[in-house]
Amino acid sequence: MTHGKTHKILLLPGDGIGPEVMAPVSALLSEMVSRKTIDLQVSEALIGGSAYDRTGHPLPADTVARALDSEAVLLAAVGGPKYDTLPYEHRPERALLGIREKLGAFANLRPAKLFPQLANASTLKPEVIRGLDLVVVRELTGGIYFGSPRGIVTEGGVRVGINTERYSEPEIERIARVAFNVARSRKKKVTSVDKANVLESSVLWREVVVRVAREFPDVTLEHMYVDNAAMQLVRNPGGFDVIVTGNIFGDILSDEASQLTGSIGMLASASVGGKTGLYEPIHGSAPDIAGKDIANPSAMFLSLAMLLDHSLGEPALARTLEKAVESVLEEGVRTRDIAEPGCTLVGCREMGERISRAFFRLLESLGRGR
Ligand SMILES: NC(=O)C1=CN([C@@H]2O[C@H](COP(=O)(O)OP(=O)(O)OC[C@H]3O[C@@H](n4cnc5c(N)ncnc54)[C@H](O)[C@@H]3O)[C@@H](O)[C@H]2O)C=CC1
Ligand SMILES: CC(C)CC(=O)C(=O)O
Ligand SMILES: [Mg+2]
């Protein structure tokens, strides 16, 4: 099972439910190491509000250095009401954008796939979501979250909040190429989502995507305005294969897509483009449920699966971990967000333990565990 090389990964549990959903994943990794499933060096660092409390900075230099020195980073979530009144530079969310930028993780892949066991957990009719399987390819290090000028200024005695949406041709080209390549391994369809009827940044986005599409004649390209895309996602999600879009539109559409799969607690992501891959559930720190042991850790496990696949070259372990999540769902075990009548309702810790046990059981049945 080991490849003779020690992989190095960094865990960033963060805030709110972050440490709760990270704990069972960290335990799984420790057991993988002690069983010699994989040769791995795992360490942990601070990010977000918890880093601010301990060091006065939400993204300590030590965290950035250790992230850059790792093959992959697994991040849970940051933020919380306690930090909402801090100036932007000190906010946990700034640290999140900062680590993405420092790692050069410009392409955020957010697959939304329906586990058939959760067909009734979605708020949409089963016939609408049957077979749902799409990927949002979100540009992650540009757009309005990063553009300048930004800030709150006073103009003629009136306070004005300013943010800037901007995209350069190279930024659009590289994210478009990622999306077309992803589509090549799937149903060969890309839907580029923009607001080209009102935004110049979107006019350029569309022009560049059309140009890149010529390199991929086997992939079908369609364009959609973001307002229509938001509607089509709940009307006919099966019409999508790969959605490529900018930072803010991708953020919003992927949360919408998550609900089609039953819960935001089910959706993982991979942010790639730099030397070190960054893997995160798409959800936030969920302050409303933090500390109650009711969060769903599945997205955190599925993010580890993406890490094993994309950064560590371990697709078999990744598929086994996905199957472990599926087998626990198949047993009718549910956290509160995906509960249904007759299910076995469990907390975050127990859900995590069950996924881990299923993982090692499946590995053993494949002759890959002890
Ligand atoms: N990647 C990150 O670290 C992100 C951080 N945030 C931050 O998180 C904080 C809360 O933001 P919200 O808008 O409330 O978004 P959120 O994603 O944290 O929560 C939205 C809703 O989904 C539920 N939820 C989220 N994850 C869940 C899970 N694993 N299991 C069960 N239910 C889950 C929450 O209870 C809440 O009702 C804010 O400070 C925000 O800035 C938000 C999104 C992403
Ligand atoms: C700070 C936000 C941009 C985080 C978020 O909502 C996300 O990346 O999905
Ligand atoms: Mg989001």
Image: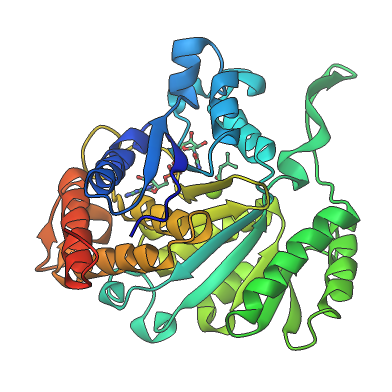
Instruction: Tell me the residue at 46%/40% (across/down).
Output: 8
Is 134 displayed left or right of 1 in the figure?
A: right
Residues 193 and 197: in front is 193
Give how far across and how far down residue 15 sits, in percent: 40, 30
Q: Residue furthest front?
A: 4
Quadrant for residue 135, please give it.
bottom right
Left or right position of 162 against 8: right
Q: For residue 14, say whether it is visible.
A: no
* 86 over 247 or under it: above or below: above
Locate residue 44, reporting x and y percent.
40, 30
Quadrant location, ligand no. 1: top left
Picture layout, residue 283 above or below residue 88:
below
Could you say where residue 63 lies in the image, as x and y percent from the top left? 54, 25
User: 211 or 89, which is in the foreground?
Assistant: 211
Left or right relative to 147: residue 66? left
Q: Quadrant of the N terminus?
A: bottom left
The residue under the point 83% across, 70% down is: 209
